[in-house]
Amino acid sequence: MSWTLLVALVLALGLAFLAALARRIELTRMQRRVNERERAVRSGSAKAQLQHPVIDLTRCLGCGACVKACPEQGVLELVHGQAMVVNGARCTGVSACETVCPVDAITVTLTDTEKRRDIPAISVELEAVGTPGLFLAGEVTAHALIKTAIDQGTAVADEVARRRGVDTAAREEALDLCVVGAGPAGLACSLEAKKHGLSFVTLDQEAGPGGTVAKYPRRKLVLTQPVDLPLHGRLDRKSYTKEELVDLWQKIARDEHLPIHGGEEFKGLTREPDGTFVVQTGAHSYRARNVCLALGRRGTPRKLGVPGEDLPKVAYSLLDASSYQNRRILVVGGGDSAVEAAVALAEQPGNQVTISYRNESFFRIRQRTEERLNESLAAGRLRVLWRSTVTAIDAHAVHVELTDGPSRGVLEIPNDEVFVMAGGLAPLDVLERSGVSFDPALRAPISSVTEQGSGLTRALGIGLCLAVLALGFALWNADYYTLPLEERPVHEGFSHLRPSSGLGLWFGVAATALIVVNLLYLLRRAQKRGFSFGTLKAWMTSHVATGVLALLLATLHGGMAPRDTVGGHALWALVVLLVTGAIGRYFYAYVPRAANGRELELEEVKLRLSRLSESWDESQRAFVEHARAEINASIAARQWSSSLVGRALALLGGQRDLRRLLHSLESEGQRQHVPEVKLREALTIARHAHHTALMAAHFEDLRALLNGWRYVHRWVAALMVVLLVVHICYALIYGSPDFTGGAH
């Protein structure tokens, strides 16, 4: 007995320790993700410049499929058991998260479309609104993905071919199509135009196809999705180097004898009275009935507007880092291209590389770039000047102003080369002159992403219908199902309703088959290789439907009277499984939603506090920084560092701690002569932040307790499978034509 107690105590304490440790690791991970989100909000990179994921917290189950599917780490993370957009600026628009979400809880959409004036107004056919025959494709449409560019270019050529088929007034002296740009969109449009037999020409300011990709640094990895190029076939690989992809495109252009005219810079186009376009380049003009502008968005490089920027040592792109060795180099910018160039330059012998970036951290860089950056920083190969601005460039030095930190002021840095990678200015002027409108009122409205609800009402309605059908069948045969078990063998319906033969047996077979299909969902959700057909959404719907149907059929199979047997226990396990599944599918999202709602509210409060000092005098800003540090420390102690018991006690002691904090801040503000109005504003924000953090912590604790349904659901599923297997074996061994359902 003593041995049993000792072993049980060791096991119980071990499990409790592991559970507490796992919980502490989970809270630490969430704290890190929330902090990253707050930094992204402060730096303005929480939202992407173009496409951005939006999460419906009323539906999100916290399955993590979106996080796993996203090709760029750090865009999405799980916080409080639900997906959260941490760094939207890293979103590349692949929309893999939207595709794999089993409950339609995530949508990838363009941001701030009602205000932006850099997104063209185009129809669903990619035609410029108000200018028939003028099409756009690729990055210029505000979609940066290579696959999307190829799809759009193909669609434009298809549309032109369709219209040519019904245009009986077509004139031979004008081309069917003029494609401007030989990047992925222009190349796909050209290939599809040749496939349809269109007369066309493709123009590009560079010597050959490649577009923006051809200007990437040497050996840069280009991520794509598997795509289909017209006349070539499928590109199955998901990753190519820049050289591999450009070489492939050039080979395709040569093999297909595409009429690509390189070295022709697009200057604009005009339209003749008969509707024919005249495309002007620096050297020639071309007449075409349709035009596809696949120019990209970069346009001309963005300049700094500082003295010395026109010096020969200033460049706006980097093609080959190995050409620069034993040089003192400054890279200006914080995007992926800038950091990637700086890292590549830092890896060359003898280089001293510095990055100047106006924000406090890099949030728009991809994971692989961040990893290389961290390696270079750790090795001392480069340094970063945060919150810095270049003010002047000399022949042998650059002047950089630091706007934050203890080293505020202007630094003079010895320098041989400057790379300005601050993005580009989209060719909006030339596009507008060509007939492309950027008026938000002319763009097709993008439906705003709103909360859809958990779908509980619809699910309950469907479940009710199925249950009513089962009840109707049971009532139709009530004279059999209401009889005691020992009297059923003499009933005329016994031969086809009993569990061992006829319809009753088929009910059991169908229930078993549905359970097997139901369990296959786990394999599909885990995205096991070789088992990835169908969408996760369809599998989730099937998971719910098969679960309900299996229970109803199993109930009829058991003759509406489950007994204290293996089969009866399997049926009750199926009931528990359905209940815990319903909790997970429909009810569990409400508590995490509340916790994440408080987290977002707290984020806004902290942002208000950080911006509070912007309108204050320099002498008063120190108080705001002190208040922010005190509040953040208090929040961390209550929200992340404390235990469940500690936070429960905080319900009683929280107000006392808050009063102590506010009194301390008020005394500090009075010592620093902060005006009464501003002091009250800071204390109000502090009170709001403390209260919101405490509520977020309590919701998280409640979520952690409710999270037990997941384990109940899984273990009951395992128990049900075991009981079902034993029940089937029992029936096969002892079953006979005269079997009376004793197993039930």
Image (cartoon, grey):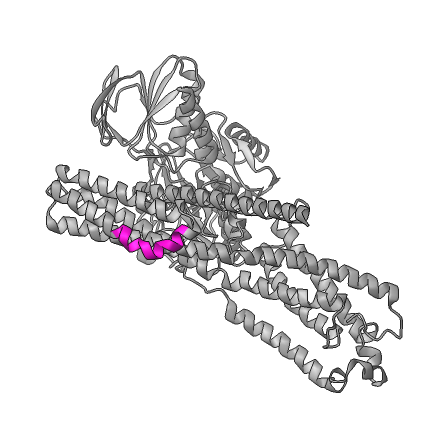
The residue most toward the front is 2
For the stretch drawn in magenta, what is the main secondary structure? Answer: helix
Snapshot quadrant of residue 579? bottom right
Q: Where's the C terminus, which quadrant?
A: bottom right
The one of 211 and 625 positioned closer to us in this rendering: 625
Residue for point 77% across, 67% down: 509
Residue located at (29% from left, 19% from top): 312
Q: Is residue 654 magenta?
A: yes
Residue 715 located left or right of residue 40: right
The residue lying toward the viewer, choosing from 115 and 11, is 11
Vertical arrangement, residue 724 with respect to residue 322, above or below: below
Q: Residue furthest right?
A: 737
Position of 288 relative to 557 (above/below): above
- Residue 707, horizontal then vertical, whole percent: 52, 56
- Comparing 702 with 350, the one in front is 702
Q: Position of residue 206 (x, y in %)?
A: 43, 30
In magenta, the rendered stretch is 646-658
Left or right: 438, with 472 as reference point: left
Q: Count every numbered label the image shows and give the total.
A: 0
| Res 199 visible | no
